[in-house]
Amino acid sequence: MEKYEPVEIGTVTSGPDSPSPLKVDFVVSPQKSVHTGEYVVVEQDGGLLILQVRNLVTSNRYFERAESIQEFERSGRPIQTQFPTADWEYLVAETRPLGVYKEKQFLRPTFPPSPGDKIQKTPKALLEEFLGFEKKAGIHMGSLEFHDVPVNLNISKLLQKHVAILAMSGAGKSYLTSVLLEEILDRKTEDGRIATVIIDPHGEYSGFARSPEPGDNESVDYSDKVSLMKASDIRIGVSSLNAYELASYFIDSSGAQKRELSRIIDELKREMKQGLGPYNLRKIMQKLDDDAEINTNVKLPLLSWLKELEYLNLFSDIDYPNISDIVKPGKAKIVDFSGITDLRKKRIITSFISKKMFSKRRNKRIPPFLLVVEEAHQFVPEQSRQGETPSKSILETIAREGRKFGASLCLISQRPINLSTTILSQCNTHIILRITNPYDQKHIGESSEGIDQKVLDMITVLRVGEALIVGEAVRYPVFVKVRKRKSRKSPHEKTLQEAAIEFEKKQKQDLDDLDAFM
């Protein structure tokens, strides 16, 4: 690290449990400012002990006794006019030691600084190296709060072991995800490009696939790299499924039912090889109905389940589209579910896409990919019955095994409490925006390494556009101010007021057009 000019901002104080290797308190110098989440250093034994501010407490001895304040103010004059109270106010920062930089190495803190040692601002170069930021070809998420340090994350550390983006509604998770997608789409071939597929339940990312509107000179055009596919156009080829894959879409099917279904499908596959062509659900139902040897208690539920699947208008003779055609390096495909209201249908489509992608990636027939799943708690819920959520099994499999094959997940959820603990614990990096629900906070704390109660408390007061990054992508928890998005604004980002004005404006225009026509 280059030499730097130290800037002193405080002095280490002595207390019952500070300074120690776990906690260091310091009094902030007059005219200096410190913020929670900020990093500071103190010289120690030829090295620099790096600390993170976890809490700030303002004290003033004139205001310690409530009865004294009341007595003085009975005179009708504020206590500030009777005594020099401002001279006795001081700010104490509570910090957690993170590591020691010594002889170009980072060591864990094992010995506390001494009371009276001077606290200093952290040098920019030291902070970049200590937090593990990438200097070249990194994913630029924004800047470190209270420091002039860009947050550039290593793409492998961020995505290879999966990432979860968690926030309450309106906290900015879709905005942050858009920033992440921009970074992935902007990568050059020599930096390593991956393919991206986005499961988009509400069409929030459809703006990526459209050119900016006339007059919009600020938005970057990503339409040459991003394409949109309506989920309602997807078809699952029944003849490409085995009996157990098809039965995974049934709710609580038995072993006997799966065996009979397997026998029927084996017959149809033999017929297909003999030149009769692919088969569909209707042919399976005909075979079942014609087979008099199958027990009625087995046959009737099978026919009922198959009719339910047929009603979804999702299954056909062959697959559409070909997964190899939509997973391309440096490109993104948005699967827009906004025209589908049936949750089960959404889950079946997600299961189909995920299985095909993972299977082809294991055989290296498609490039390394990132599968982005918005509203992930719908597709990988904590509690579900067999067959109720077919997407859960395959997504948990990708979470466990995907890193070995270059298959990555990005899970986005506003209800972490409803998201599978299994899959959340497999996401080694968490990007957390504001969350106030105590049950969601508890769920995150139990599944995220490196988050303690102090950090959880800080999450509740994050502003829109601020996020906490914790896990594999960074060495220590990092609070980041998300950078400005470059892509076209989502059509869902209108306020209620804007939507109401737009509706009436369109309604008036339609009436004017009708009058002009008449």
Image (cartoon, helix red, strand yellow):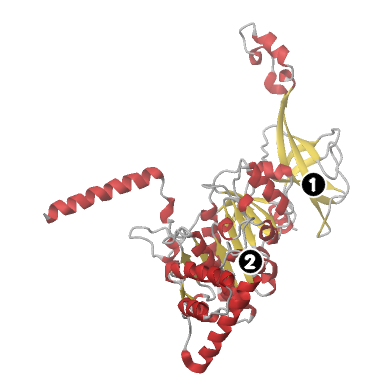
Q: Nearer the viewer, residue 271 or 163?
A: 271
Q: Nearer the viewer, residue 283 or 395?
A: 283
- Please name the amino acid that badge 2 sits on: Ser
Q: Which mark is residue 97?
A: 1
Q: Please, is residue 13 above or below residue 507 in the view? A: above
Dividing the picture into quadrants, the one containing residue 408 is bottom right
What is the distance, in whole Å, between disc 2 and disc 1 at their CAs?
41 Å
- Asked if labels 1 and 2 touch by Cβ distance under 8 angstroms, the answer is no
Q: Please, is residue 114 above or below residue 413 in the view? A: above
List x then y, in percent, for residue 283.
Answer: 47, 80
- Please name the amino acid that badge 1 sits on: Pro
Is disc 2 surrounded by few (<14), some (14 to 19) or many (20+) residues within 10 Å?
some
Q: Please, is residue 463 above or below residue 483 in the view? A: above
In this view, the residue farthest toward the top is: 75
Disc 1 is placed on an element classified as: strand
Disc 2 is placed on an element classified as: helix
List x then y, in percent, for residue 2.
Answer: 74, 57
Quadrant of the drawing holding the C terminus: bottom left
Dividing the picture into quadrants, the one containing residue 456 is top right
**Residue identified by numbered label 2:** 393
Q: Residue at x 41, y 49 (%)?
A: 494
User: In screen coordinates, is 477 left or right of 42?
Assistant: left
Q: Please, is residue 186 above or below residue 494 in the view? A: below
Q: Nearer the viewer, residue 431 or 123?
A: 431
Q: Nearer the viewer, residue 362 or 472?
A: 362
List x then y, in percent, for residue 229.
Answer: 44, 69
List x then y, in percent, for residue 99.
Answer: 80, 52
